[in-house]
Structure formats: structure tokens, C-alpha cells
Amino acid sequence: MKEMPATERPRERLLRAGAEALSSAELVSIILGTGVRGQTALSLAGSVIRAFGGLRGIAAASTRDLASHRGIGTAKAVQLKAAVELGRRAVTLEPEDLVQVSGPRDVASLLMGEMRYFDREHFRVVLLNAKHRIIDIVTVSVGCLDSSLVHPREVFKECLRRNSACIILVHNHPSGDPTPSTDDVAITRRLASSGLILGIEVLDHVIVGDNRYSSLKEMGLMTPAPANAPAAFSWHEPWPVPQACAVGWKGEYEL
């Protein structure tokens, strides 16, 4: 690892770009922590993945089998099995274990601590079940926010796979100012229209700034404008939101 530029090491890349940006080998190398003589943690991770036929093979392998692989040993095998079990539990949480949201403050409180420090725009989708409990939070794009990066196909792909009833869009403004731009509004309306077709309601788009956030729902900027509507910012008909999510959505706030 020492031969790699500091910015390209798995830990630093995770801090900079998020865990979803790392390869499986990089993630496993972080769990392993160190390599062995002649092998970095990253090359050791790659050899383990190949030896057991991928992540599914590692998950199915016994602790003894993992420990028998050169460079792993009992301690690292236990770390791998613990990580696998945490992942399994995360995707099999009982409904009562899922976080319920009732407004943008809940969403902002959940994500602002991380997203307010990003130096690039991260676009995320909060997947909700019918009771507005969070199923998952998915990162769709990282970089400058525009329609080419935030395509309905990518936004709704995971929603359909996870059978999400409704979603909340979230992205950050690195400037710290959560005021929505014209592009933010256009993208939101495009995705809201796509959601109508698919039967997945877009409840809100929350923009995170530096200890502040905005709710496009409360600002009246959610509803797709009809063909004869004038400028984008003049269309203020409220988006029909279930009563459970209609409380406390009042535009821009500080946390």
C-alpha cells in the first residue's frame, strides 16, 4: 500500500468518495487491515476473493476455511465473517427496526452529518416502504448534478428491485447554500413524472447545505408543470403527499 499514492489507498478513497465507489477487493482490504510479507492488504484481498469464488463464496465459507488461506489466519477470518454477518443482518432487518421518516428534518438529520462535508454533489435516493420506513439509501451519482448523471433509469432501478412504495430525493450543495437551482427543479419534476408512470411516488427532494436544508415539496416546486405553464419557478400547485409525510415540511431550515 505504501507504494500507492495516498489519495488512491482504499481508506482514503472511501473517505473521499464513499464506500459505494470502492471495488470489492478494496472493501475487503479495509476489513483485513494489513497484508503479509510480499502482499499488500489489497493484493491479499484479491487473492481471497479469487480463491473462494467471489464474495458469495467468502460468505459461504467457514471460518476455518478462510483461516487456512495464506495470509488470513484466525483473526482476519473472524473479521471477514463478522462483516458478512453485519451485511446479512442489514438487509434482513425487521420492519420495526427500520427508521421511519415523517418530514425533511428526519432525512436531513440522518444524512447531513456526512453530506454537508462533501466537496462534490452526491445524489441519493431514500427508499421507503408503504409506512414510510427507510428500506435503503442509494447513491445514484457523484459529481456535477445534471440530467445526464441523474437519469430516471438509474434512480428507479433499485426502487423497483427493492419494491419501494415511495422515495425521497436528496443531494448536497458543496457551497453550503441549499437554495434549489433551476436544474434542481427541472430534475425533480422529471423524476416525479417518471415516478407517476411507475407508480412510485416522489415525496420530496431535500437539498443539504452547511447545517441547513431545503425541501422542494414545501417550496411548491415538486409538481411537474403542464405544457402551457410559464417559467419553471412559477408553478406552485402542491404535490399530493400522504398525510403521514405532510407534517413539518416548510421549505428551508437550519438543523
Image (cartoon, rainbow, N blue to C red):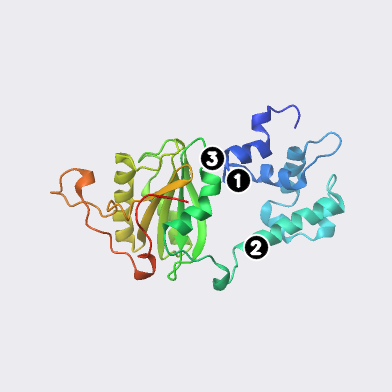
Which residue is disc 1 drawn over? 19
Does 252 sit above or below residue 63? above
Quarter-of-image position of residue 56:
bottom right
Q: CA distance from mark 1 to mark 2?
A: 17 Å
Q: Which disc is residue 88 wearing?
A: 2
Secondary structure found at label 2: helix
Q: Nearer the viewer, residue 234 or 23?
A: 234
Q: Residues within 10 Å of mark 2 (few under 14, many from 20)?
A: few
Quarter-of-image position of residue 27:
top right
Do labels 1 and 3 touch, CB within 8 Å? no
Q: Residues within 10 Å of mark 3 (few under 14, many from 20)?
A: some
Residue at (57, 46) in percent of width and height: 20
Report the amino acid beneath label 1. Ala
Report the amino acid beneath label 3. Tyr
Residue 76 x/y as whole percent = 81, 50
The answer to whether residue 133 is left or right of residue 9 is: left
